[in-house]
Amino acid sequence: MEREARNGTRGSSELGAAVVSALIRAAREVWGLFVEDGSFTIGIMICVALAIGLLPRVALPSPWRGPALFAALAAMLLENVARTARK
Amino acid sequence: MSWAHVGTAVTAAFLASLVEFVEALTIVLAVGTIRGWRSALVGTAGGAALLTLLVVGFGPALQRVPLSTLQLVVGVLLLLFGMRWLRKAILRSAGVVGLHDETAIYAKQTAQLQMESRASWYAGLDGVAVATSFKAVALEGLEVIFIVIATGAGGMLLAASAGAAIAGALVIGVGVTLRRPLARVPENTLKFVVGVLLSAFGVFWIGEGLGFPWPGEDLALLGLVAGFLIISALGVWSARRGTVRAAAPSSVPPS
């Protein structure tokens, strides 16, 4: 009976470990949909943060705020692909 | 809402979903051919059921989120997703990264599935086959849902859903008829175009979410698409130059 109980505990802990590992794998896959190159993702987030925090405070005419965000992202994309190609 | 906006939403959802459906189909076909169609279809149905639950569960909740917040969050996610695709497509076009090849992926997947032990899991089903096709359908389908929500965020969910549904019907129809991976779909070119469209949508929604008035209003979306196309062409040119320079021997003579 004791062995059965031990086997049961081992079985449930193995199942738990398998579930946790499957969840971690799934989370990694979902994360991978958005993030591939860490520095590139950080760059995009910095551009967005600047658009949220800085653009409304600078004396830039409103219709130019969106194009300014585009320009920052475009410059970052060009820098990243050029750097990756040189590696 | 303009025709430029509706047309861009349908096109973006159609093209992006087409890529995702082709990727899922490649894996399901490999599983079905090697491990049996019953297990492959059970996994596919399971993945589709999970996606349906997610849409039914979270879909109505999305309508309660204020539009500006939704546009900002979706815009950021779309930008991360789209620019990741665009960066990879540029590097592939420049020859820095290998091209995506459905035939090679199919061959790799079938070889891997042939090596896995064939242990019966439940009611004669093959556990590895069910899990592999479930994962492929659930993950690629999750991307399709995200793309539909993102491209239809400005009240064009129906148009974006129609684009994705047409892509799904097309890929499933051709896949069932041919029973082999759709290698002739120019996936790298599609990813390039979709990366451009999704990035343009991402910037546009972030601007809308933050209340930036776009010059030309909705037509600015077409301007952003053109802008990202020009930047991508520049990126391919610059990456090609970078690769050639890195490969060239040093001009400094050895001492």
Image (cartoon, coloured by chain):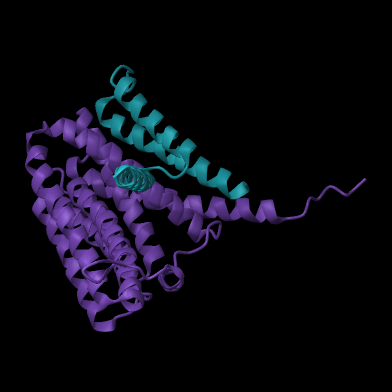
Chain colours: A cyan, B purple
Q: Is residue B125 above or below residue A86?
A: below
Q: Nearer the viewer, residue B177 or B247?
A: B177
Q: Could you say where residue B8 lies in the image, as x and y percent from the top left?
A: 21, 54
Does residue B53 show up? yes
Name, please, the residue furthest toward the right: B255
Q: Could you say where residue A66 lies in the image, as x and y percent from the top left?
A: 29, 34
Which image quarter holds the C terminus of chain B?
top right
> Total marks drawn?
0
Q: Could you say where residue A11 lies in the image, as x and y percent from the top left?
A: 32, 48
**Residue drawn at x 13%, y 54% as measured from the top left:** B52
**Residue drawn at x 32%, y 36% as measured from the top left:** A67
Name, please, the residue furthest toward the front: A1
**Residue drawn at x 49%, y 43% as measured from the top left:** A78
Q: Nearer the viewer, residue B32 or B142?
A: B32
**Residue drawn at x 43%, y 33% as measured from the top left:** A42
Does residue B160 show up? no
Q: Is residue A24 above or below residue B145?
A: above
Q: Nearer the viewer, residue A18 or B12?
A: A18
